[in-house]
Amino acid sequence: MPSPADLGDVLPLSVAAASGYLLGSLPFGFLVARSRGVNIFEVGSRSSGATNVRRVLGAGPGRAVFALDTLKGAVAAGWPLLLAALWSSGVRQSAGAGGPPVASMVVPATHQLALVMGYVGLGFALVGHSFSCFTGFRGGKGVSTAAGGFLVLLPCVALISSAVWVLVFYPTRYVSLASILAALCLPLFAIILGSGAIATWVTAVVALFVVVRHRANVKRLLTGTEKKFERKKPDGPPPGAKP
């Protein structure tokens, strides 16, 4: 049977998973497009990600969705670390006044547990983003949400992978190729920078997830039929818009 200490970690990890999924499921791309009279699942690549929103609706809505999707990944990964820091500060402040206060059952008692909760939260946020319970388990491909989470958990690795994305995208104009290569760089640089076993495994799983979500793009890249990113022309209503 599990020990009380093991059981004590189950609840915080479960809360991180549930909150991560719900945060990830927030369908910002769908909502932004719907506010413009467009069902984003019926136009373009039929993804609710920032790239498809930008293709269909233009730079402004695309940037808004990118920022919001990145933010939900950062929040899903970051709140346990923030809570652990606040708790640690509370312990230090109360140490001279009769001992530390009683911890809440969902407060991570150590930085290591908070870090694991952050990885769990980010993982489930990716699942929620791609298979949102609010949109019939449809969604985006997880790149923006993953970027936000790793900027919190592994900032150096995330920044290097973001640089790879930029260096691949601008010469080729293939968002899918840039996203795939940036994702594959995550575990590589996690190893090079000595980020630890947990970080290496999580980044490897996320990279695999991103590649699988782009499997149709991979086929088109191999056959030379993948479309390059082009700026939306300002003339006329977006495709699929309701009058």
Image (cartoon, rainbow, N blue to C red):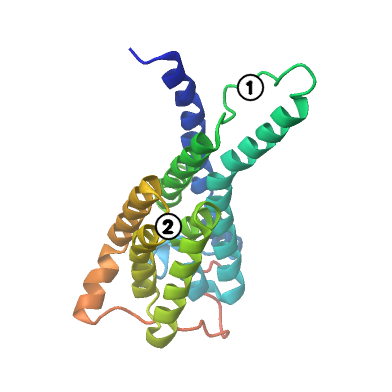
Which quadrant holds residue 172? bottom left
Position above or below: 102 against 65? above
Which quadrant is the N terminus positioned in? top left
Q: Earlier in the sequence, mark 2 or mark 1?
A: 1
Which quadrant holds residue 33? bottom right
Who's the residue at 46% across and 69% down the image?
Answer: 160
**How far from the left and from the top, in percent, is residue 195?**
42, 53
Neighbor class of circle 2 (other Cα within 10 Å; few <14, some 14-19, many 20+) is many
Foreground residue among 77 and 116: 116
Q: Amino acid at mark 1?
A: Ala
Q: Amino acid at mark 2?
A: Gly
**How far from the left and from the top, in percent, is residue 230?**
45, 83
Element carrying mark 2 = loop
- Would residue 65 appear left or right of 10 to someone viewing this image? right
Q: From the viewer's perspective, is the residue at label 2 or at label 1 nearer?
A: 1
Spot the residue most to the top. 1
Who's the residue at 53% across and 59% down the image?
Answer: 155
Residue 80 appears in the figure: yes
Which quadrant is the C terminus positioned in? bottom right
Mark 2–mark 1 Cα distance, whole angstroms, equals 34 Å
Who's the residue at 39% across and 58% down the image?
Answer: 190
Q: Which residue is mark 2?
A: 142
Who's the residue at 50% across and 47% down the image?
Answer: 24
Which quadrant holds residue 177? bottom left
Position above or below: 221 against 184? below
Q: Return the mark for residue 35.
A: none
Q: Which residue is mark 1?
A: 103
Foreground residue among 70 and 188: 188
**How far from the left and from the top, in percent, is residue 65?**
56, 63
